[in-house]
Image (cartoon, rainbow, N blue to C red):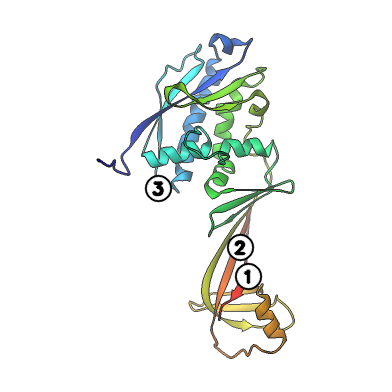
Amino acid sequence: MNQQPKDEKVETVFAISYDAEGSELANHMIDAKSLGNAILGMDELIKAAAKIVSNGSSEAKLKVLAPAQEGSLEVVFAILADPITTKALLAGVGLITTGLAVGSATAISVIERLKDRKIDRYSVDVNTKIATLEVEGEKIEIPERIAQLVTDKTVRAALHKVIKAPVENIEGARVKLLGENNTVEVEIAPEKIGLFDPLKVGSLEEVVTETNQVVVKFIALNFKGKTGWRIQTRDGFECAVHIADEGFMQKVTANEEAFQKDKLYTVDLEHEQTRRPGNTKNTYTIKRVIN
């Protein structure tokens, strides 16, 4: 069996359809400017999504196969990219659902779940690749790549151009994303089209958490509490730490832990980086003292 080279680019065809009863769309007509902007938006969406799902290692090009003329209801596109990137971006954005497990998160499904609410906080666990979006007290856990798509300004602005802008103010409008053989992959109902706005203005707090096993020595001690400790790693990095290991702290308060100069400890060290516009904060926590 011949195997296709991983980086070989192939064409993948899909389409978008705009429809509404009792409007120009019902007669296969759409404003030329609106359609043109939607096509540009789709191009921006595909290129931005390809970079995100491939971690910047691949890119995609978009072609229009059907004439983009006033009077068109359905526009057919072709993505030119390697198959892995194409599948990841189509599934990640939510342009296809075939082959996805029931309930799988996509950028489109998450935006619908957000219900026009501002994302207050975006955190990701580097070890598990699971991200958490905090919205008005609700926590939504999704794969990291999906969260990156949902919180990317270019992707959100492009989805607005593709989904909402062409049918804005058209009552009962529906947007359908079509796969092979014109199969409806995704249908966005009239009541959900209004949710596809650019990312809301506001301070989106992004938190990235990573835990690594490292060897350290304590250079500042606090026998009375979990804060006020300071460590130094073998490569000379120093930082203040919070001690979250209850067993270790019990030994400290009971004077069962003898600290000696240059004594080394193997610990699970969690690094949490909080990013806000113009500000980045790093905190370190010893989750477990191994030995």
> In x, y percent, where is residue 149?
55, 42
Q: How many neighbours does mark 2 have within 10 angstroms: few (below 14), some (14-19), or many (20 or more)? A: some
As drawn, 52 above or below 185 = below
Near mark 3 (Cα within 10 A), the count class, few <14, some 14-19 or many ≥20, is few
Q: In the displayed structure, would residue 280 be above or below residue 163?
A: below
Tell me residue 1's x, y (percent). 25, 41
Q: Amino acid at mark 1?
A: Thr
Residue situated in front as seen by the camera: 47 or 193: 193
| Residue 272 image label | 2
Q: In the rendering, at what x and y percent does residue 241 appear?
A: 64, 73
Residue 90 seen anywhere in this rendered image of the structure: yes
Closer to the camera, 199 or 53?
A: 53
Q: Earlier in the sequence, mark 3 or mark 2?
A: 3
Could you tell me how far apart the alpha carbons at marks 3 and 1 are, in whole angstroms? 33 Å
Residue behind mark 1: 285
Separation of marks 3 and 2 at Cα, in angstroms:
26 Å
Say which amino acid is labelled 2.
Glu
